[in-house]
Image: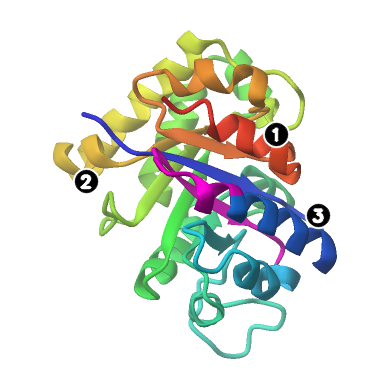
């Protein structure tokens, strides 16, 4: 089955307003000018500049979303941002379950599931991240860990039109190290098989599974050519418009 590619950029905790507007404008102008749009683009800036970035990307076709959201709709939750607030800002989606959230904020599969469920209820698209640590891979537990994260983090009402899975081996994020293509293929095919058990084969066949972890222009073409890799979740390279665009341009 041919699935449309998605190139997503996670800016993490980087960018003040002027920088964010300049970066978003550069990406948006390139995408808007593209006659044959073979791929979709999504950027996730910090909360503080979401509004400005959404405005800079307006009418370009580039989706803008957040890096996290609360599992609650509203109420006494100091410091949290609800999915409805993101929707109100003009966001099209949100990333949940990133390994840095799981590690730094002790987020469990159950919490990630609750956040994804809340985001879907607010009519946001959701990118759900999964991935193993180096210790888990070296212990031969990659599929056990990733399988448990998929089963625990993906809501049972997930659909291919609204939910995307991103496989990000923790040990490859920002390190310059990446799994072999055979390792990436193995995990992506396994994730699709777990989605089939959870949601049904039809949804699993249509759902996009992204690869993330040290994706850059020099390795993007090889990664994106793999049969079960439906795009990329890009970190550091998404902070430079030319590099981010060069990754997108490898989509065939």
Nearest the camera: 11 or 84?
Answer: 11
Classify 10 Å Cα crowding around label 2: few (below 14), some (14-19), many (20 and above). some
* Structural distance between the alpha carbons of marks 2 and 1: 35 Å
Residue 138 lies in quadrant: top right
At label 1, counting other C-alpha atoms closer than 10 Å, the crowd grade (few under 14, some 14-19, many 20 or more) is some
Q: Is residue 248 visible?
A: yes
Magenta-colored stretch includes residue 51: no
Q: Quadrant of residue 77?
A: bottom right
- CA neighbours of label 3 inside 10 A, class few (<14), some (14 to 19), many (20+): few
**Residues shaded magenta:** 30-46
- Percent across and percent down for residue 50 are 66, 70
Q: Helix, strand or loop at disc 2?
A: helix
Q: Is label 2 or label 1 in front?
A: 1
| Residue 81 left/right relative to 71 | right
Check the image and report above or below for 110 versus 143: below
Drawn side of residue 177 relative to residue 37, left or right: right
Q: What residue is disc 2 on? A: 199
Residue at the spot 40% in from the left edge and 75% down from the top edge: 122
Q: Which quarter of the rendered picture does the N terminus lie within?
A: top left
> Which label is found at residue 243?
1
């Amino acid at each position: 089955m041919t699935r449309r590619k998605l190139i997503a950029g996670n800016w993490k905790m980087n960018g003040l307003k002027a920088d964010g507007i300049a970066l978003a404008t550069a990406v948006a102008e390139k995408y808007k000018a593209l006659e044959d749009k073979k791929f979709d683009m999504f950027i996730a800036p910090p909360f503080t500049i979401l509004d400005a970035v959404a405005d800079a990307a307006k009418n370009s076709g580039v989706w803008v979303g957040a890096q996290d959201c609360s599992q609650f709709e509203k109420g006494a939750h100091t410091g949290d941002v609800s999915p409805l607030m993101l929707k109100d800002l003009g966001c099209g989606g949100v990333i949940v379950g990133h390994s840095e959230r799981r590690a730094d904020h002790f987020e469990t599969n159950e919490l990630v599931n609750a956040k994804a469920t809340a985001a879907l209820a607010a009519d946001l698209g959701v990118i759900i991240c999964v991935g193993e640590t180096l210790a888990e891979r070296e212990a031969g537990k990659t599929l056990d860990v990733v399988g448990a994260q998929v089963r625990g983090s993906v809501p049972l009402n997930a659909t291919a039109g609204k939910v995307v899975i991103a496989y990000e081996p923790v040990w490859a994020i920002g390190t310059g190290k990446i799994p072999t293509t055979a390792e990436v293929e193995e995990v992506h095919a396994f994730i699709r098989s777990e989605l089939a058990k959870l949601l049904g084969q039809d949804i699993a066949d249509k759902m996009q599974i992204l690869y993330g972890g040290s994706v850059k222009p020099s390795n993007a073409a090889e990664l994106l050519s793999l049969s079960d890799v439906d795009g990329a979740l890009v970190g550091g390279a998404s902070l430079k418009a030319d590099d981010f665009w060069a990754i997108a341009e490898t989509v065939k």
